[in-house]
Structure formats: structure tokens, C-alpha cells
Image (cartoon, rainbow, N blue to C red):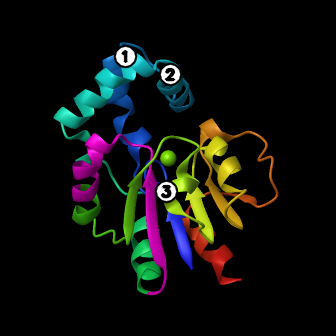
Amino acid sequence: MKIGIDIDNVIANTFVDLAARFNEYMGRELSPSEVVEVMRREKLRMWGYWFLTWRKRLLTQVSVIDGAGETIREWHREHEIVLVTSRLPVLNRQTRQWLAQNSIPYHELHHSKETLKHRKSGACDIFIEDNLEECQVLADHCPTVFLMDHPWNRRPLGKSNIVRVSGWGQIREALKH
Ligand SMILES: [Mg+2]
């Protein structure tokens, strides 16, 4: 099987771990859902934040979401693992370093604009993602798309092959059947 996987908030606990940094940069107290909103709306201001992230190497410091490491290590022996992130390409080195640091193996790593991940990944049998809009596009290209449940994606799924999951344990279970 070819398995496509997003990185932020699917493998890496990015929002949870960096929320305080982000709020400090923005000078406001934002909830995780508001952070997603602001990141999309205030693109120009985000360049400053990404620069800070790059300079302080923040992405090398985030934690791994429970179950992600073990599952990907196990899958990697039998399946093709394609990581697709919407992080800017300038963050590629930190991303690769973080993956190595946490012993997360993969066959390919791509950077993509939001909602265009299917172009980089090619046809995947399954894809795991936390951005609902991305899932809705991926659902036209992959038979099964798992949406990692987070406060910012709690809206109707819109497509029958999108499956909302609470975590990695649930994905492992679903794939056994
Ligand atoms: Mg994500």
C-alpha cells in the first residue's frame, strides 16, 4: 500500500507545542482553531512567524503525537510511506532532522501548497490529514482518507470516504479489518 501522511498535527504535536510561541509572536491569546484561522488569513504576517520558526529551529523541538512513531516504523517495513507537508520548503532541513531525531522512517518527503497535496503524493491508498479542506480534495484521489480529529476540523466531512479518527490507535484498528 502507498500511505500518504501529513506532518503537522498528525505526526508532530505542532499546534499544542508551539501555541504559546505563536501567541507571543501575535501578541494575543488565540485558541488552536483561531490559530488556524489567523494562519490562513494573515499570510503576510505569517512570513515573519515562519522566519522566526526557521531561525529558532522551533520545528526540531516539537513532540511526536502518541502512536505515530511506532505505527509508521511498523508500516514502513511493508508499505510505501509518503510524507506531504504544507510547511515552506525552507523548513525542509529542520523537518528531516526532526524525523531522524524521532526515528520516523519514510520513502518520500514533499512540500506542497494546501489543497494540492494529491499532486505531490500521487495516488495513495490511504492518506492521513488534519485539514478538512485538504481531505475533501484528497478524497477524490484516494480510496480512504483519515481525518485526525482536532477542534479546528469539527465540521461535516462532506464525503463518504473520509473517516474521522481520534488518534493513531483507531487508524491501526481500522486497517486491520
Ligand atoms: Mg496538518
Q: Nearer the viewer, mark 1 or mark 3?
A: 3
Pointer 1 residue = 26
**Of residues 19 and 105, the one drawn nearer to the viewer in this rendering:** 105
Instruction: Name the quarter where the C terminus is drawn.
Output: bottom right
Residue 157 x/y as whole percent: 76, 47
Per the image, is 69 magenta? no
Kind of element beneath mark 1: helix
**Residue at coordinates 47% horizontally, 48% vertically from top-left?**
9
Q: Sequence-wise, which precedes: disc 1 or disc 3? A: 1
Pointer 2 residue = 38
Q: Which residue range is magenta in the image?
A: 78-97
Residue 49 x/y as whole percent: 31, 25
Q: Can the viewer see residue 66?
A: no
Q: Gap between marks 1 and 3, in whole Å?
A: 32 Å
**Residue at coordinates 28% horizontally, 70% vertically from top-left?**
103
**Residue at coordinates 79% horizontally, 42% vertically from top-left?**
156
Q: Gap between marks 1 and 2, in whole Å?
A: 10 Å
- Check the image and report above or below for 60 versus 155: below
Beta carbon of the mark 2 residue lies under 8 A of ligand 1: no
Q: Sequence-wise, which precedes: disc 1 or disc 2? A: 1
Q: Nearer the viewer, mark 1 or mark 2?
A: 2
